[in-house]
Amino acid sequence: MPVILIADACKPSLVMSSEVFKDKIAGATILVASTGKQCLELLQGNKPDMCVVDFDLPDADGVTLITAMRKSYRGPILLTAYPDKIVEQAKAALPKTDKAAA
């Protein structure tokens, strides 16, 4: 069964994302985190097949979190964000291997 880790501080977005994945991927296990710290803790004890990280977390921006996640996780990470100059600047700081999907 696929495991998907979603990190988003906005509860409605977190619920919506979780439900979409549950609906589209039968039997998927969805792990949820509302902070970067929670995301990293869940990543330590689990091996997700995919991660979805929102840019706007209360304790870290999404790019900083992805950089920390890459120390132990090599799977796909989807970064979600509203278009903004700050997001574009942060994306530019991503390693080349992560920019393709950003």
Image (cartoon, grey):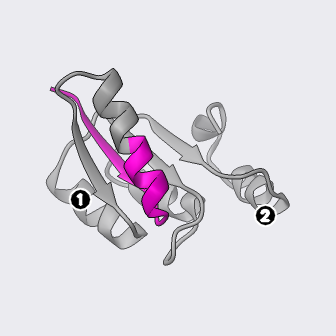
Q: Is mark 1 on a helix, strand or loop?
A: helix
From this viewpoint, which residue is outermost toward the bottom?
59
Disc 1 packing (10 Å; few <14; some 14–19; many ≥20): some
Whole-percent x and y of residue 38?
Answer: 31, 68
Up the image or down, 68 lies above or below 88; here it is below
How many marks do you count on the picture? 2
At 35% across and 32% down in the image, what residue appears?
21
At 58% across and 39% down in the image, what residue appears?
98
Question: Cα distance, mark 2 to mark 1?
Answer: 27 Å
Q: Which amino acid does label 2 sit on?
A: Ile
Q: Is 38 a magenta residue?
A: no
Up the image or down, 16 lies above or below 63; here it is above
At 35% across and 22% down in the image, what residue appears?
24
Instruction: Report which residue position mark 1 lands on.
Output: 42
| Quadrant for the N terminus in the image | top left
Of residues 46 and 19, which is closer to you in this image? 19
Q: Is 13 a magenta residue?
A: yes
Q: Is mark 2 on a helix, strand or loop?
A: helix
Up the image or down, 40 lies above or below 52; here it is below
Question: Can the viewer see residue 75?
Answer: no
Instruction: Report which residue position mark 2 lands on.
Output: 86
- Quarter of the view holding residue 42: bottom left
Disc 2 packing (10 Å; few <14; some 14–19; many ≥20): few
Q: Which segment is the magenta one?
A: 1-17
- Quarter of the view holding residue 23: top left
